[in-house]
């Protein structure tokens, strides 16, 4: 039987004991990081000499992914790291990256510093493009065997059906939301039809600015004092799936059409140094955004019995939330009827 509130058992002692069970020595420092789907903690460690360091422990939400799917996430991260792409890959203990402790599946990662990249900066966008192009060059070499794909059925139709059946939408807004969602999904299907037969590859899946750590330029301490080191590091492959390349690009652009065109132009300028981009996928940009909006509402609904969700997302239970979603879907319907954005 599935525990309806599995994280209620995840006390600080359980977190620290999980790491110590594989030989890590915790020094008592423990900080919960900003994660709701899983539970993620920054943990202080010390070695035999007493030197302090930090690690990140990820406790996977039970029953979300199978063991094979989690191991594919880990294998992809390690494959990227082996290709010298800066990604935070899991640590292995006795050859195992996925640990079991008191009913939880756990992975431990090295702690990496940085901040979200400045998406208003054209140079940073070009850096991001090159970075994602390198990731996709590796991601295209073979498919996932166990992880799902991003498609209309799993990101649009199934979440729609779950929301309609679950009683989450206020009765007076049920029909407006149903109609808006139906028209939005029709627009998504037309967008996919216009894109035609596009390739899919292993993608990050949730490539927004919060999942990329940017280390700003710093003067090298070596012999050349004018040499600059810049760094991007990818984190959190939890949503990695098979999907179109544009899935890892569209979340990095925002604003009006002209602004997004300029942003896409800079990203693709860097991207195509390492990977080809099929321009037909530009038809999918607003369609993928629409699917994410529907999927996000269903995600909140699925997790509503987790006590962390009503506390952190109280707006979900209000009529205003659903009024805004109806307007949002109507805006997406209009946007999907426009020609695709042209990179400038």
Image (tube, grey):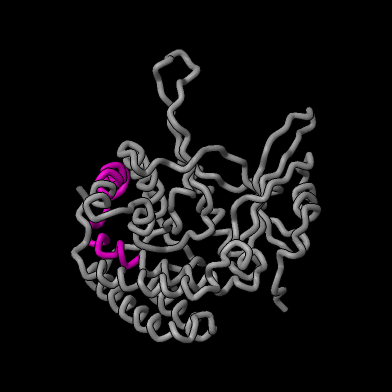
Q: Is residue 17 at all visible to an observer of this figure?
A: yes
* Res. 58 image quadrant: bottom right
Query: Does 287 appear in magenta?
Result: yes
The x and y percentages for residue 189 are 29, 76
Q: Residue at x 43, y 53 (%)?
A: 207
Q: Position of residue 144 (x, y in %)?
A: 46, 62
User: Residue extending furthest top?
Assistant: 223
x and y, in percent, of residue 145 in the image:
48, 65
Height in image: 156 above or below 113?
below
Rendering coords of residue 338 (x, y %): 20, 66
The answer to which of 96 and 303 lies nearer the viewer is 303
Magenta segment main secondary structure: helix
Q: Is residue 88 above or below residue 51?
A: below
Q: Write down the region rendered in magenta.
A: 264-288
Residue 161 is left or right of residue 280, and the answer is right
Identify the image quadrant of residue 225: top left
Determine whether, in the image, residue 47 is placed left or right of residue 110.
Answer: right
- Relative to residue 17, is residue 267 drawn left or right? left
Q: Is residue 98 visible?
A: no
């Amino acid at each position: 039987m599935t525990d309806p509130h599995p994280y209620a058992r995840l006390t600080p002692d359980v977190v620290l004991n999980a790491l110590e069970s594989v030989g890590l020595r915790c020094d008592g420092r423990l900080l919960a990081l900003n994660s709701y789907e899983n539970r993620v903690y920054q943990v202080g460690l010390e070695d035999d000499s007493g030197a302090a360091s930090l690690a990140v422990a990820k406790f996977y939400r039970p029953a979300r992914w199978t063991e094979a799917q989690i191991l594919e996430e880990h294998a992809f991260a390690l494959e990227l790291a082996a290709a010298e792409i800066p990604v935070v890959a899991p640590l292995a203990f006795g050859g195992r990256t996925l640990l079991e402790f008191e009913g939880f599946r756990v992975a431990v990662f090295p702690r990496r510093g940085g901040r979200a990249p400045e998406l208003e900066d054209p140079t940073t966008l070009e850096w991001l493009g090159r970075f994602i192009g390198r990731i996709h060059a590796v991601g295209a070499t073979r498919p996932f065997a166990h992880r799902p794909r991003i498609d209309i059925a799993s990101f649009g139709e199934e979440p729609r059906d779950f929301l309609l059946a679950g009683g989450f939408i206020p009765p007076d807004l049920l029909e407006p939301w149903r109609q808006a969602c139906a028209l939005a999904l029709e627009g998504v299907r037309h967008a996919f039809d216009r894109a035609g037969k596009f390739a899919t590859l292993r993608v990050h899946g949730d490539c927004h600015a919060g999942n990329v750590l940017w280390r700003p330029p710093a003067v090298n301490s070596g012999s050349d004092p004018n040499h600059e080191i810049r760094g991007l590091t990818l984190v959190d492959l939890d949503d990695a799936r098979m999907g179109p390349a544009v899935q890892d690009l569209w979340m990095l652009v925002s604003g009006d059409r002209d602004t997004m065109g300029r942003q896409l132009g800079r990203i693709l300028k860097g991207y195509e140094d390492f990977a080809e981009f099929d321009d037909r996928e530009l038809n999918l940009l607003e369609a993928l955004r629409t699917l994410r909006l529907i999927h996000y509402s269903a995600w909140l609904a699925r997790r509503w019995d987790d006590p962390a969700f009503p506390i952190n997302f109280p707006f979900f239970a209000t009529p205003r939330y659903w009024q805004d979603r109806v307007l949002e879907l109507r805006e997406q319907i209009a946007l999907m009827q426009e020609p695709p954005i042209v990179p400038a």
